[in-house]
Amino acid sequence: MKIGFIGLGKMGGNMVERLLNAGHEIVAYAQTSESVKKVQAKGAIGADSLRDIVNKLESPRIVWLMVPVGEVEKIIDKINLFLEQGDILIDGGNSFYKDSVRRAEELKKKGIYFLDAGTSGGIWGLKAGYCMMIGGDKGIFEKLEPMFKTLSMENGYAHVGPSGAGHFVKMIHNGIEYALLEGYAEGFEIMNAKKEFNLDPYKIANLWNHGSVIRSWLLELAENIFKRDSKLDSINGYVEDSGEGRWTVAEAIEENVPAPIITLSLLQRFRSRQEESFSAKIIAALRNEFGGHEIKKAK
């Protein structure tokens, strides 16, 4: 298949390479010419603008976006000027699902098909393949199955519903990821605090990955990390969030679904960004005030 690909970052560049390795023809564009040159060296056709990428594709065109959330709307508005009836636009990033529903409806007025393809796999997808959650017109999905099959690991792609469903499922996926990460982090922190046992986190992660009920790919990655640096001395415990955890919590509230674990895992990320917690100071001061509990003086 011939595919236009916009966005050649950590995931986008690897996805292009995986498609090229399977014999697909790729026309690639990114904001930096260095990124385009990198995939050109691997066999892609370079484009120097959105108009150029459209001109180098035959109708009906297939264009895949793999760009940050804040760039999706801008790019769609610009490339929509050049796309024609019957063309297909795919958003493989982490867009908010309600935006994807709206974009599909707006593009449909011009006769352009839109698929939202939630994509998981990170930097490992090049070799292992991705997991793809795809929403939109099922007939268009079936037409593009060879591409999805190439990108995904075996049984790693599915049409999950109408427009917006792909990004909705990916949003929930990421919310669950927040909770899993927090669970592992808390468990290993408790073990790290038990100094008299002198526990080896690498040894324990390796052990748990052999038959325990909490074995997982995330735990395998933790094992790799602890093998390199068991105390994580080189890492600052500042944790960002992509936005999908926030959207998941907001959706839970909107649907009256209790989601305390995912919610608390999101709030813990906010806590990681505070050098000093003012609320903790208030609690310490109040405990001293009503109970005479000791206060640790600021350094």
Image: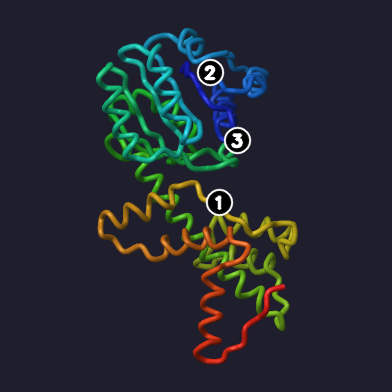
| Residue name at image x 49 percent, y 32 percent | 151
Q: Which mark is in front, 3 or 1?
A: 1
Q: Name the residue under label 1.
A: 240
Indicate how the structure is coloured in the image. Answer: rainbow
Q: In the image, what residue type sits under mark 2?
A: Ile
Q: Quadrant of residue 72?
A: top left
Q: Can you identify the residue that label 3 sits on?
A: 10
- Residue at image x 65%, y 21%? 42
Q: Which of marks 2 and 1 is nearer the N terminus?
A: 2
Secondary structure beneath dot 3 equals helix
Q: Answer above or below: position of 86 versus 106.
A: above
Relative to 102, 27 lies left or right: right
Between marks 2 and 1 in the image, the one whose residue lies nearer the viewer:
1
Q: Which mark is residue 26?
A: 2
Q: What residue type is labelled 3?
A: Lys
Q: Is residue 125 above or below residue 142?
A: below
Counting from the top left corner in percent of width and height, residue 28 is at: 55, 19
Q: Position of residue 44 (x, y in %)?
A: 59, 17
Q: What element carries label 1?
A: loop
- In three-dimensional space, the C-alpha distance between marks 2 and 1, rounded to whole angstroms, equals 32 Å
Does residue 49 sit above or below 130 in this rendering?
above
Mark 3–mark 1 contact, CB under 8 Å?
no
Q: How many discs mark residues in the rendered view?
A: 3
Residue 39: x, y in percent?
63, 22
Q: What residue type is labelled 1?
A: Glu
Pointer 2 local density, CA inside 10 Å: few below 14, some 14–19, many at least 20: many
**Label 3 – label 2 distance at C-alpha:** 17 Å
* Quarter of the picture holding the C terminus: bottom right
Mark 3 touching mark 2, by CB under 8 A?
A: no
**Separation of disc 3 and disc 1 at Cα?**
17 Å
